[in-house]
Image (cartoon, rainbow, N blue to C red):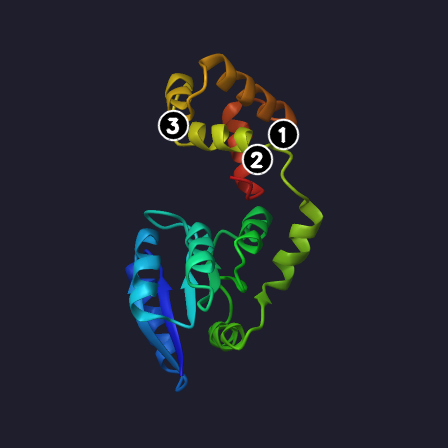
Amino acid sequence: MVRVLLAEDMLILRRALVSLLELEPDIEVVAETDNGDRVLPLAREYRPDVAVLDIDMPGIDGIRAAARLHRELPGCRTVILTTLGRPGNLRRAMEAKVSGFLLKDTDPARLSAAVREVAAGGRVVDPELALTALQVGNSPLSDREAEVLRLASQGEDVPEIARTLFLSAGTVRNYLTTAVTKLSARNRMDAVRIARDAGWL
């Protein structure tokens, strides 16, 4: 029996996924949550074989949750199931050692098969997304530039970002200017849009 933890913040979708997976005679959903911060505590408690994680949830996102699971409970393998099919998200997920990456419009039978395959030690990645990720390439932003841009995307102004990162306001402005230039953006918000579309934030 493959034991599954499911993390999805949309209640109706989460319930549908639980019902779908539990139709399979060899799969049991042992825990579910709508919050990324609950993934690791639930995994410690229930010891699932596979965690199926959305990316965009309250608390930490699914990719960060997957990275924590890999570090602390390496026996629990992870599948990202998301609408955020951006090449950068796939790369981030691979860096977090996820075993599967599927889009939410995938065939239901494909999800069940992916859970089994991942539990058996395999890897499953949406083939079209993998091809797109190869074509887009890596982010031109440094870690610090991406961090500053991410905070700007959340509505923080330069003084707030400076306080958060313990930098001077001038340094923050320099990072933002460099990010805009590297992304060939018109302004800061255009840079945020470009980086998000590529999955770099």
Say what secondary structure mark 1 lies in: loop
In the rendered image, residue 140, in percent from the top left (x then y), is placed at: 65, 34
Residue shown at the point (59%, 64%) measured from the top left: 125
Decide which of 75, 33 is in the foreground and name it: 75
Q: Mark 1–mark 2 contact, CB under 8 Å?
A: yes
- Number of marks in the rendered image: 3
In the rendered image, residue 159, in percent from the top left (x then y), is placed at: 39, 17
Q: Specify the amino acid type for callout 3.
A: Gly
Residue highlighted by disc 1? 183
Q: Picture quarter containing residue 31?
A: bottom left
Q: Specify the amino acid type for callout 1.
A: Leu
In the rendered image, residue 148, in percent from the top left (x then y), is placed at: 48, 28
Residue 104 appears in the picture as rendered = no
How far separated are the C-alphas under marks 2 and 3?
16 Å
Most extreme residue toward the top, as rendered? 170
Residue shown at the point (52%, 24%) measured from the top left: 188
Q: Is residue 130 left or right of residue 155?
A: right
Residue highlighted by disc 3? 155
Precedes in sequence: disc 1 or disc 3: 3
In the rendered image, residue 85, in percent from the top left (x then y), is placed at: 54, 53
- Where 189 falls versus 85 (above or below)? above
